[in-house]
């Protein structure tokens, strides 16, 4: 990718035409310009808890139709697909970097069969005297694999610390791996230090839960500790046994994260709803109430997993 290519992508069509004389037939393009959205984003603490304006400019090069369009909207790449890609990635989780957001938007647009290449420009309008931003170009050739999971919803398992040292744990995990994609949740073995400040107390409780996950991972090498949605999705696709360290996903959640993060089963129930799990299996603890996902109970010493929905 050259700087000329980016300049031509976002320039007026006359500039693009003049800059590509002799380049042969050029792909058709559709574009979205000056699309402004209020977003909570940023790596600095001052950027948490408030929104700032982002401006999106996106140009998509599309394949030429293999037959006359016949004025049929179903045969073209709709502009709505661009705005939907932006909205989807903004709703998925809170992000720190514009670069990450640009990458994800580009990858989502490139899943459209007509899309050949996409240029994404995102600018922060409220962080300084000018617009601060990033510009990227991605194509199918350089994009990540479009492999997806087989559609099987995972089983979310809450495993109480009282069962971490049970000799039957290894056999139970073998049974889980042979049966269904799964995400295991746990909590700290000892209570987290207290704080009179609610925000500090919540952060401390999340760090304690992360610590509990890593302590459990140290007992069983088959666990893959996951801290982000990307890591979680990747572990599911690879058929790995995911062990959730919750702080990042909870802190990056957009408005619906639980306030009481010291409740291990309740936190597991929130994750189960977030990933649209097939069920929540609670082991060694009282099951949560008010969960929109089916809740099962069991023990790691049982001969078989409970019947899953």
Image: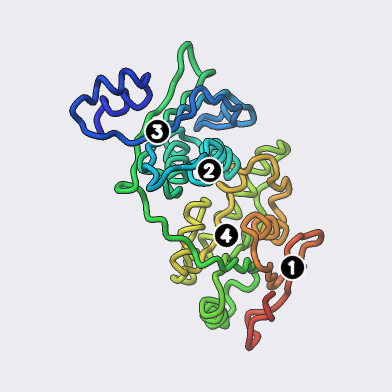
- Quick one: which residue is furthest to the bottom in this view? 303
Report the disc number at residue 294.
Answer: 1
Place of residue 56 in the rendered image (x, y in percent of width and height, measured from the top left): 49, 27
Mark 3 surroundings within 10 Å by alpha-carbon count, few (fewer than 14), some (14 through 19), many (20 or more) = some
Number of disc labels: 4
* Residue at (62, 57) in percent of width and height: 275
User: Looking at the image, is mark 3 or mark 2 earlier in the sequence?
Assistant: 3
- Identify the residue position indicated by label 3 in the image: 29
Report the disc number at residue 72.
Answer: 2
In the image, residue 181 above or below residue 124: below
- Quick one: which residue is furthest to the right in this view? 290
Dot 1: what SS? loop
- Calculate the distance from the C-alpha at mark 4 to the C-alpha at mark 3: 50 Å
Mark 1 surroundings within 10 Å by alpha-carbon count, few (fewer than 14), some (14 through 19), many (20 or more) = some
- Calculate the distance from the C-alpha at mark 1 to the C-alpha at mark 4: 25 Å
- Identify the residue position indicated by label 4 in the image: 212
Place of residue 63 in the rendered image (x, y in percent of width and height, measured from the top left): 37, 43
* Residue 35 falls in image quadrant: top right
- Quick one: which residue is furthest to the top in this view? 129
The answer to which of 203 and 91 lies nearer the viewer is 91
* Residue at (71, 36) in percent of width and height: 197
Instruction: Classify residue 156 as left or right of residue 258.
Output: left
Place of residue 146 in the rendered image (x, y in percent of width and height, measured from the top left): 41, 56
Which is closer to the viewer, label 2 or label 4?
2
């Amino acid at each position: 990718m050259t700087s000329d290519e980016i300049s031509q992508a976002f320039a007026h069509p006359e500039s693009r035409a003049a800059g590509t004389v002799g380049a042969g037939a050029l792909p058709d393009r559709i574009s979205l310009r000056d699309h402004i959205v209020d977003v909570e984003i940023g790596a600095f603490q001052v950027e948490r808890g408030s929104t700032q304006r982002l401006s999106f400019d996106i140009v998509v090069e599309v394949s030429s139709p293999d037959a006359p369009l016949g004025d049929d909207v179903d045969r073209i790449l709709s502009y709505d697909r661009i705005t939907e890609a932006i909205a989807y990635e903004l709703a998925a989780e809170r992000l720190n970097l514009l670069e990450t957001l640009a990458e994800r938007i580009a990858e989502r647009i490139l899943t459209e069969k007509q899309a050949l290449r996409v240029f994404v420009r995102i600018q922060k309008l409220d962080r300084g005297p000018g617009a601060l931003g990033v510009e990227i170009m991605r194509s199918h050739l350089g994009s990540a694999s479009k492999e997806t999971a087989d559609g099987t919803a995972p089983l979310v398992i809450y495993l109480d610390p009282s069962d971490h040292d049970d000799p039957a744990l290894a056999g139970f995990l073998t049974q889980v791996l042979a049966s269904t994609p799964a995400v295991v949740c746990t909590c700290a073995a000892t209570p987290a230090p207290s704080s009179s400040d609610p925000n500090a107390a919540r952060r401390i409780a999340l760090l304690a839960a992360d610590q509990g996950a890593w302590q459990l991972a140290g007992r069983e090498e088959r666990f893959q500790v996951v801290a982000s949605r990307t890591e979680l999705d990747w572990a599911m696709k690879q058929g790995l046994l995911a062990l959730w360290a919750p702080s990042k996903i909870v802190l990056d959640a957009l408005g619906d994260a639980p306030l009481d993060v010291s409740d291990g089963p309740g936190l597991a129930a929130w994750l189960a709803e977030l990933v649209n799990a097939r069920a929540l299996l609670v082991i060694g603890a009282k099951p949560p109430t008010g969960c929109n996902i089916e809740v099962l109970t069991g023990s790691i010493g049982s001969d078989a997993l409970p019947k899953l929905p």
